[in-house]
Image: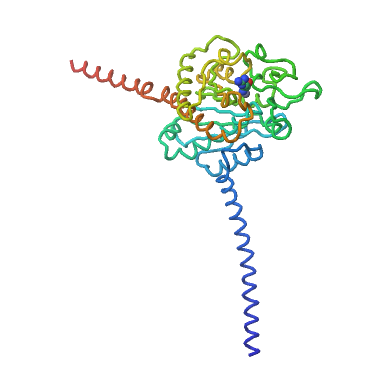
Amino acid sequence: MKLLLGTLYLLGILVSEELGYDGSLAQHRREVVEETVSQRRGLDAYSYTRYHPMEEIYQWMIQISEKYAEVVTQHFLGMTYETRPMYYLKISQPSNNPKKIIWMDCGIHAREWIAPAFCQWFVKEILQNYKDDSRIKKLLRNLDFYVLPVLNIDGYIYTWTTDRLWRKSRSSHNNGTCFGTDLNRNFNVSWCSIGASRNCQDITFCGTGPVSEPETKAVSSFIESKKDNIVCFLTMHSFGQLILTPYGYTKNKSSNHEELIQVGQKAANALKEKHGTNYRVGSSADILYATSGSSRDWARDIGIPFSYTFELRDNGTYGFVLPEAQIQATCEESMAAMLSVLDDVYEKYWGVDSAGKAASSAVVLGLLFSFMSLL
Ligand code: ARG
Ligand code: ZN
């Protein structure tokens, strides 16, 4: 009996030691699994109908480029004044044919929180649908999307920590007596000529010179380096429910103004179909106010054919402090407008009315010549 008990006791030690060893291995495995699961759950649980602090948006960018690694990559664009990294997401379907670029930035004005929310929504919609939705699939055949979810990161963080209605960047001026440049008055286009201020206390302070700020430098030099391939420049703001075309610095019209208005009006119609929201379309100088040094005007003047500012919801009821309850509807309708613009851009460069026409007239000519050679 004692022998039996002794054997059982020994067996017990051996078994539990086995378990102990195995247990810690299992625990390690469990930790690794939990880490990846929580990361995946992090993205699955990410709410696109809430506003997110910058740290969460940084994490979201990492997670989305990991989950959709086959089409999304994250790239460094530059540093903010307060030395935070600016990243954009590149959505690109691998392919050998040369592609054109769509640029979208959000949050150049810190307090317009619906704009970064829309950039994230836009990325999510493209990624969740590009495999099954023929419309998005088609766009990705010839277009790459470059999305900068928060342009003015320092200002955005300041609206979370200190002042919800801060608009500008956080650069320091006059020996630290006033802060912030209006980044959308700082681009190198008719700089500080109209609708902007040289007083650093003002909310439309144009900076100390054209492109004086690290954020506008980063965006400008990147866009400049890719400008020959960028067909559409979209910059997202709130509020006012407007689709704005160039220019803000003059009432003169860009060479393709009629086309810009036509494409913009069609987008406004598509937007209205979603939830009945009314948007107006026109140049900034005509339907909002005069502005100089805006990225939209600068982009148009360096030769990017389609350039728009979107002023999202609302019309002033909540203004910059749009309730989270309106994020979904705002993003749904704005997505409809974007896809309308993108369809039109696509049609212009790759539709049957451009390449197709050239191809079919070549066929007709070819037939004509072969017919003539028979005579
Ligand atoms: N986001 C606008 C800007 O860039 C501000 C719009 C204010 N809206 C308005 N309806 N006044 O200046
Ligand atoms: Zn704005």
Return the x and y of residue 95 as percentages of the image width and height: 45, 35
Q: Find residue 29 and report its image quarter.
A: bottom right
Where's ligand 1: which quadrant? top right
Return the x and y of residue 203 as percentages of the image width and height: 70, 20
Please name whichever residue, 90 or 161, is drawn nearer the observer in this view of the structure: 161
Q: Which residue, as the protein is rendered here, is positioned at the far front?
A: 317
Asked which colour scheme the image uses, the reply is rainbow
User: Horizontally, is 374 left or right of 5 in the view?
Assistant: left
Q: Is residue 26 above or below residue 215?
A: below
Say which residue appears at 61% left-offset and 55% top-offset: 32
Location of the N terminus (image quadrant): bottom right
Please name whichever residue, 98 or 104, is drawn nearer the observer in this view of the structure: 104
Say which residue appears at 60% left-offset and 35% top-offset: 324
Q: Is residue 176 visible?
A: yes
Q: Which residue, as the protein is rendered here, is positioned at the far bottom?
A: 1
Number of disc labels:
0
Q: Is residue 286 above or below residue 113?
A: above
Q: Is residue 349 above or below residue 328?
A: above
Please name whichever residue, 130 or 164, is drawn nearer the observer in this view of the structure: 164
Location of the C terminus (image quadrant): top left
Q: Is residue 220 visible?
A: no
User: Horizontally, is 360 left or right of 153 in the view?
Assistant: left
Return the x and y of residue 60 as percentages of the image width and height: 60, 41
Return the x and y of residue 179 as percentages of the image width and height: 75, 24
Q: Which residue, as the protein is rendered here, is positioned at the far top?
A: 252
